Image (spheres, grey):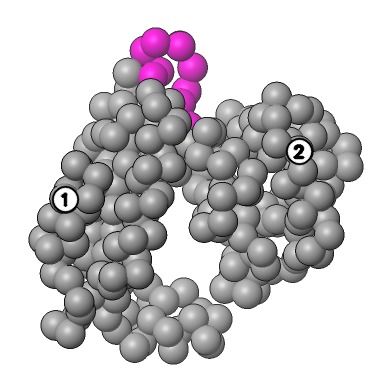
Amino acid sequence: TLLLSLGMPAAAASHLRIRYVPNLVEFFERPTRASIQTAVQKLEGLEVLTAPENSIEYLRATQVVDTQAPNSIFAALNAAEDGSYAAMVMDLPSAETPWMLHPLYFANLVLIVARPTMADLFAVRHTLNALSILGSKLPRESIYLVLNQVSADSAFSPRQFAEELVSAVDWSPPISAVIEHDPNILAAQNQRVPAVTRSEKLTRGVRQVISNLFPGMERALGESEASNGKKPTLRL
């Protein structure tokens, strides 16, 4: 699996105890498949690519809007997909810049994580409208929702959250998991240890995501493999 941490600063650096350098600047300065490999950091069974921490370098990448440009973020994602990964997981920022949009053009599955609050309800509504611009590249069947930090005191139940989305944009992505609020998750993150090792509630949520997404993904990936004759990669 390849994890691409594309926010600024890259969240993977703090959570996984990796460095901010090397990063994708290696590719932007020398856009070749080989330069991607010099930017990869390895953690046991996981490989990680991060966006640059330097604000100037991060903003410079957003100036390359054309996905066909050889030094674009989209080109970097294509170069990273070298056939060795079963999955590429992209952690995206919410700002609608090429750091968000190019990966969405590249993705074949989208998982929106939101809290059951009014602010996140409006944010999800906006995101769904933005995704609709991508049209058939990302059909509705490829978009899922996770509700995070859910408790008895939440402003919306999962059902209410979905109903509000339907009333606003005429549809709601399937809720693939509901993760209950657990202070152990934040404590683990602050201690820079994997939260799934400290929270059974988070572990149950992750298992829900897997059980709800993988049947459809296996079918979709099988169809992709049959159509193009090569091993497909999950791009989440």
Q: Amino acid at mark 2?
A: Val
The stretch in magenta equals 224-234
Residue 131 sits above or below residue 6 on the image: above
**x, y percentage for residue 129?**
37, 43
Residue at the location (33% across, 30% down)? 139
On screen, 154 above or below 226? below
Q: What label sits on residue 29 in the rendered view?
A: none
The residue at which mark 1 appears reads as 167
Q: Residue at x 82, y 56 (%)?
A: 57
Location of residue 10 by image quarter: bottom right
**How far apart in space, not on screen, are marks 1 and 2 (Cα)?**
37 Å
Q: Secondary structure at mark 2?
A: loop
* 89 left or right of 179 in image: right
Q: Nearer the viewer, residue 176 or 133?
A: 133
Quadrant where the C terminus is found in the figure: top left
Q: Which residue is mark 2?
A: 64
Task: From the top left corner, tell me how far across and down residue 48 is, in percent.
Answer: 63, 54
